[in-house]
Amino acid sequence: MNLKIGNKEYSSILFFISETLFLSVGISDILNKSKNDAIISGILGIILSFIFLYLILKFNDYERNLNIFEKLDKLFGKYIGNIISIILVILSLLYFIYLLWSQNIYVQNKYLEETSSIITTLFFLIPVLLLVKKDMKVISKVSIAIFFVTIIELLFSYINLFNKIDLNNYLPIFNTKANNILISSIKYASYSITPVIFLLVTPKNSINNPDKLNRNLYIFNLISGIKFLIVVSFLIGIFGIDLSKLFYYPEYSLVKKINTLNFIQNVQNLLTVNSIYKLLISEVLSLFFIKTYFEYKNYNKIIFYIMIIISVFLSFNLFNNSTIGYNFIKEYYINIYTIPILLLIIISNIKTKIKA
């Protein structure tokens, strides 16, 4: 019996977590800065994302039998290593709160306007907690299954949107300052790759064919990048840049344009669950990351569940309205979340080279 985690199954998680920061503000932010040149920013961003991903995977190659908390303790010593681990746990908790908030806004605005946010949150949180209680092998299997469903849904969606594209909407191009294109590219790379740090909660050698892991993660990163380019291309081509940059939930806006299956009531609801998929998988990973830290330190799990309850409460009460929330996340949260992770990866890689 093979007890190791499937390589492709594990790698598929990257597809979902690399998109969560684009759901509410990411694409809107990039479109506002790059305008019609957002596709160019996306291409450069994908190239940069491979560099960022390479740094994370290079760190993961250090002591392949250890998870990230054990790596940090060995690399920096118990005291500093634990401080860094606590910072990562806090960032994971912030990530989880953001996911809950984004999920609440998305579900309330698009599906269940009259339903209490507490009910909708509990509805999604129960399966998340059940998965968190399992191991990474189960989580990975769920992820790969949802990945294939997502790809089928997306292929159907975009094939039926081709005839709605107006090529005039792509003009003018090369009309954006190079500085804005570069900033957008860096934002794309940091938005998409920084959540990957949470995948390091699983030791590399506990995965089937660990030597092929990096290749598969690169492949799923490429798939995610291609999907981003397709979404941006269709947004601009169908709605034009002025309208596109106002959308916080671009895939929902695109799918609402489909009328091929108008005999099915609310068909867009069937096709836009992709956004819910990525949120749920990301919530599972962020909580699994925190749970693993608690297990590693032998902390009381009651604290873990208290943290979840507090996170749920905060996700309801963080902002007076969604506009304030979007602006805060775009201006402050993204930097608070991404910069420490990028700095940690760079410093850790330097440290491993010194120790080598």
Image: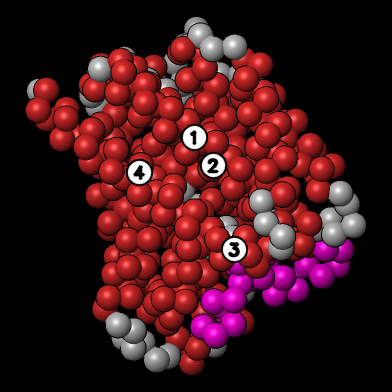
The answer to which of marks 2 and 3 sits earlier in the sequence is 2
Q: Is residue 236 visible?
A: yes
Q: Is residue 128 left or right of residue 190?
A: right
Distance between the Cα atoms at labels 3 and 1?
A: 21 Å
- Residue at position x 55%, y 21% from top? 291
Q: Residues within 10 Å of mark 4 (few under 14, many from 20)?
A: some
Residue holding disc 2: 94
Residue type at mark 2: give it.
Leu
Q: Is residue 205 visible?
A: no
Q: Residues within 10 Å of mark 2 (few under 14, many from 20)?
A: some
Residue holding disc 4: 340
Residue type at mark 1: give it.
Ile
| SS state under label 3 | helix
Q: Nearer the viewer, residue 160 or 47?
A: 47
Asked where in the image residue 65 lies, by quadrant, the reply is: top left
Q: Nearer the viewer, residue 171 or 299?
A: 299
Residue type at mark 4: give it.
Pro
The region drawn magenta spans: 238-266
Residue type at mark 3: give it.
Tyr
Q: Residues within 10 Å of mark 1 (few under 14, many from 20)?
A: some
Whether the residues at callouts 2 and 3 have beta carbons within 8 Å, the answer is no
Q: Position of residue 168 (x, y in %)?
A: 48, 92
Residue holding disc 3: 326
| SS state under label 2 | helix
Whether the residues at callouts 2 and 1 have beta carbons within 8 Å, the answer is yes
